Amino acid sequence: MFQRIKHYILLKPILQALEDHDRSLESKILLLVFGLGFARTSIGIVQDFIQGFHATEVLVDSLITAVFGSLLITIARSKKINTVHALIGVLLVILLTINFIQFGGTRGATDFNFLIAMIAFVLIFKRTVLYLNLTFLFSMILFSIYSISNENAVHKFFFIHNSTSSDTFIFSLFAVILFAIYFKRFLMEEITKLTSLNLLLNQSAEQSIFKKKEYEHNCDTLREINQKLEEKIRNKTFEIQKKNEAIEQYIYHNIELTYEPINNLL
């Protein structure tokens, strides 16, 4: 029963959303990023309990999982969400920094989390928000490296052990490959759409050229008809003028012929 509920709440809506042609690319990228993040941190929580329970480790992983999970469900259920607030990036950087310090920083195996975070930020944030989050991310990386190198109070408070597990590297590699496959698929779909659109545009252009030629032909035909009508009108006008002149001459001639006899009668 739990598996069915989990499949309905998480997996099914996410897969449907990724296949939804009405959903924007930005929304699909958010789903992919937070889906991978949720999967990775969920695995981390399971490992925490299997390999040995540590309160701060479980707390950090749980918080990251909660952030990813809530964002994932929210975006999967709404097509209108195309971006997330900049504070989400800040929160994730802080939690990743703590996780980084917990497992030895560059001496451990959690540095790949920052690599994936950088890729994720580039994908989900834009312009000023992107630059601010990346700046904060690099600042926190330098701060955590400094804390680990000097073993200051922050390092002592959060440090658990130097992780030598390769699961973070494997998952990071898997995430990069998945991003590449998804974007390649998206690009192929876009190329197919553009090719179809180009064919439609070519057909429309051919139809426009044909209609233009047809219009020009009709214009030429109308011009010829107008010229013929004008010529007929001129001819008719000339004939009417000739007839009018003939009538005027006939009337004048008859007046001249009848003028003298009428005068004699009078």
Image (tube, rainbow, N blue to C red):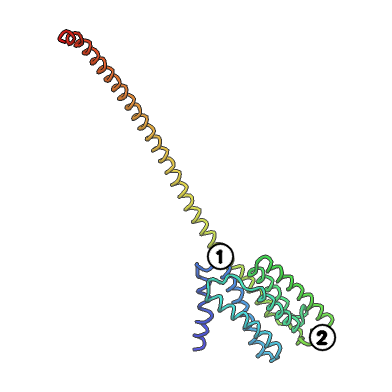
Residue 114's quadrant in the figure?
bottom right
Q: Residues within 10 Å of mark 1 (few under 14, many from 20)?
A: few
Looking at the picture, which amino acid does disc 1 mark? Phe
Q: Which mark is residue 66?
A: none
Judging depth in this view, the residue of 214 and 167 nearest the camera is 214
- Where's residue 60, x and y in %? 68, 85
Residue 31's quadrant in the figure?
bottom right
* Extreme-right residue of the structure: 150
- Where's residue 193, x and y in %? 51, 59
SS at mark 2 in the image:
helix
- Where's residue 7, x and y in %? 51, 82
Determine whether label 1 and label 2 are within 8 Å by CB. no
Q: Residues within 10 Å of mark 2 (few under 14, many from 20)?
A: few
- Residue drawn 83% across and 80% down? 149
Between the C-alphas of marks 1 and 2, the distance is 47 Å
Q: Quadrant where the C terminus lies?
A: top left
- Residue drawn 79% across and 77% down? 143
Q: Nearer the viewer, mark 1 or mark 2?
A: 2
- Residue drawn 54% across and 80% down? 10
Q: Which mark is residue 186?
A: 1
- Residue drawn 52% across and 82% down? 9
Residue that numbered label 2 is attached to: 153
Looking at the picture, which amino acid does disc 2 mark? Ala
- Where's residue 64, x and y in %? 65, 82
The answer to whether 224 is drawn above or below residue 115 in the figure is above
The answer to whether 131 is drawn above or below residue 154 in the figure is above
**In the displayed structure, does residue 16 sit left or right of residue 168?**
left
Closer to the N terminus: mark 1 or mark 2?
Answer: 2
